[in-house]
Amino acid sequence: MSPRTTSSGWASAIVRALEMGGVDCRSLFERLGMDYCALSDPEARFPQDGMTGLWHLAVEASGNPVIALNLAQVVRPSSFHVVGYALMSSRNLHEGISSLVRYQRIIGESADLSLHPTSDGYELTLAIHGDRLPSARESAEGSLAYILAFCRWLACRPLTPRLVSFAGPAPAHPAPYREVFQAPLKFNAGHYALLFDRTDLDAPLHSANEALAQLHERFAGEYLARFSDGQITHQVRQLLCRLLPQGEPKREVVAQAMLMSERTLQRRLQAEGTGFHQLLDGTRRELAGQYLMQPQLTLQEISYLLGFAAPGNFFRAFRRWFNTTPNEYRAGL
């Protein structure tokens, strides 16, 4: 299985935050077997386990358990690779964060982002996955701090989340968290998330530029395609998108289309940390969110496009994915 990686842009942001806290990152990179000079190469990528080790060594070297919060002070679009510029030129934060969710893998393969409407706003949830090493708590906390600071920078005005959630226990000294997030905090929440007011994410951005937004979206899509090229997971996902309108694809059909046996397909997917049914469910979930943004599509048509035998099966799956009904989700949009 190929190790998960982090882009040089995001690794550079982490290094700037750590060096602001007095950490000698050049020596830590050497200890971890990573090339410090490669931070200046926009195409370079660093192993996830190496970045996890960097967080642990930096906390130990600095004696500062909240050093990750320094990420809120090093905001620049290039940290998010081309995705940062797509976000910057979006019409509003909702559109920009949606791009961030779509192209997250460009920035770092270890993170999963999702954005969904709630009764009183939008919740952006974050999960950081480890590779061979468990993920570092600092990685998730620093990412939340950076995303919020980036949104505030783009909005050019105070932006106060309704709630900031942390999966871990409350720290002994919460003051630095209150200072950085300036919002209600919830620890032991079971997940990491930022809950925004709807009006904050729907407000127009001064930096909006439709032509640039389309250009950066195309660049991001092309980069992600190159980045994913050759990975079985990506190939299966693309094939599922084409096959779903014909009904629920069977694993044997997908394997035949990829000129391999079912056993080989299963083994190669497992090597990439996933499985056929997990990919099928995730692809349907992602497409469902996209289809519901198209008002001309009826729920029955969406059910058909997702390969469900009956609309009732679609409704049950949708409630499991989003904890709401398709009609309520669409109304929230």
Image (cartoon, helix red, strand yellow):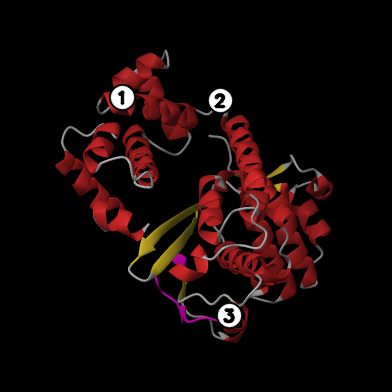
Q: Earlier in the sequence, mark 3 or mark 2?
A: 3
Residue 238 in picture, x, y percent from top left: 44, 28
The question of residue 109 being in magenta is answered with no
Identity, as a three-letter code, of the amino acid under mark 1: Arg
Residue 323 in picture, x, y percent from top left: 27, 58
Could you say whether the residue bearing mark 1 is in a helix, strand or loop? Answer: helix
Which residue is label 3 attached to? 177
Q: How crowded is mark 2: few (under 14 residues within 10 Å), some or many (20 or more)?
A: few
**Horizontal side, residue 240 vs residue 180: left or right:** left
Residue 240 in picture, x, y percent from top left: 37, 28
**Horizontal side, residue 26 vs residue 279: left or right:** right
> 100 or 206, which lies in front?
206
* Image vertical order of residue 73 relative to residue 45, above or below: below
> 149 or 55, which lies in front?
149
Q: How crowded is mark 1: few (under 14 residues within 10 Å), some or many (20 or more)?
A: some
Could you say whether the residue bearing mark 2 is in a helix, strand or loop? Answer: loop
Identity, as a three-letter code, of the amino acid under mark 2: Gly
The question of residue 194 being in magenta is answered with yes
Q: Distance between the residues labelled 1 and 3?
A: 47 Å
Residue 167 in which image quadrant: bottom left
Q: Which residue is drawn at 82% across and 47% down?
A: 40
Q: Are marks 1 and 3 in contact (CB under 8 Å)?
A: no
Q: Which residue is drawn at 66% across and 71% down?
A: 156
Which residue is label 1 attached to? 251
Does any portion of residue 54 appear in the rendered image?
yes
Q: How far apart are marks 2 and 1 (CA)?
A: 19 Å
Magenta span of residues: 182-195
Q: Which of marks 2 and 1 is nearer the N terminus?
A: 2
Q: How far apart are marks 3 and 2 (CA)?
A: 41 Å
Could you say whether the residue bearing mark 3 is in a helix, strand or loop? Answer: helix
Residue 189 in picture, x, y percent from top left: 40, 72
> 199 or 115, which lies in front?
199
